[in-house]
């Protein structure tokens, strides 16, 4: 399975959907993980940490959303991000529906 970890796009969101330790577990079981460039910086993880754990670094959100069968995200997706999802992809994250706006 292709698993995508995009960089959070909402202001003041510094968390990331998966740590390098989580990537290591998933890749150990044969999954391919794509992490967007600098997705973990706000949480203290470097791209090199993810690469050492077995992830591939993607340099655009479109690449992460377009390749992934399963995405791990913290904040609800933007409309543009939903357009990048491939058909049948699963998105897991916190949707914060009570505070959602028109975006």
Image (spheres, rainbow, N blue to C red):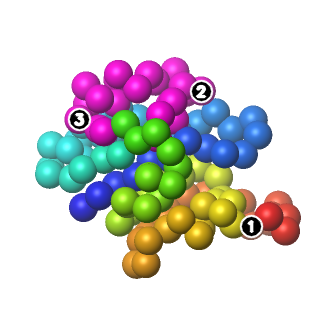
Question: SS of the residue at dot 3?
Answer: loop
5 to the left or right of 100: left
Q: In the rendered view, would you say 57 is above or below 81?
A: above
Which of the labelled discs sits on residue 63, or is there none? none
Kindly check if marks 1 and 3 are in contact, taking CB atoms under 8 A apart as contact. Answer: no
Q: Position of residue 10 (x, y in %)?
A: 72, 45
Pointer 3: what residue? 54
Residue positioned 60% across, 61% down in the render: 81
Location of residue 22 (image quadrant): top left
> CA gap, disc 3 to disc 2?
20 Å
Badge 2: how crowded within 10 Å, few (<14), some, or many (20+)?
Answer: some
Q: Which of disc 3 and disc 1 is earlier in sequence? A: 3
Q: Which of disc 2 and disc 1 is earlier in sequence? A: 2
Badge 1: how crowded within 10 Å, few (<14), some, or many (20+)?
Answer: few
Pointer 2: what residue? 42
Badge 3: how crowded within 10 Å, few (<14), some, or many (20+)?
Answer: many
60 to the left or right of 15: left
Residue positioned 44% across, 52% down in the render: 64
Which of the labelled discs sits on residue 97, or is there none? 1
From which residue to which does the magenta span run?
A: 36-56
Q: Is residue 39 inside the magenta stretch?
A: yes
Image quarter of the C terminus? bottom right
Q: Position of residue 9 (x, y in %)?
A: 66, 45
Image quarter of the N terminus? bottom left
Kindly check if marks 1 and 2 are in contact, taking CB atoms under 8 A apart as contact. Answer: no
Location of residue 71 (image quadrant): bottom left
């Amino acid at each position: 399975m292709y698993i995508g970890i995009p960089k959070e796009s909402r202001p003041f969101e510094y968390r990331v959907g998966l740590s390098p330790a989580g990537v290591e577990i998933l890749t150990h079981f044969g999954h391919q993980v794509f992490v967007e460039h600098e997705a973990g910086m706000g949480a203290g993880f470097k791209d090199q940490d993810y690469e050492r754990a077995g992830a591939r670094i993607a340099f655009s959100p479109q690449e992460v959303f377009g390749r992934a069968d399963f995405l791990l995200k913290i904040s609800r997706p933007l409309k543009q991000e939903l357009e990048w999802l491939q058909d049948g992809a699963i998105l897991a994250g916190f949707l914060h529906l009570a505070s959602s706006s028109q975006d």
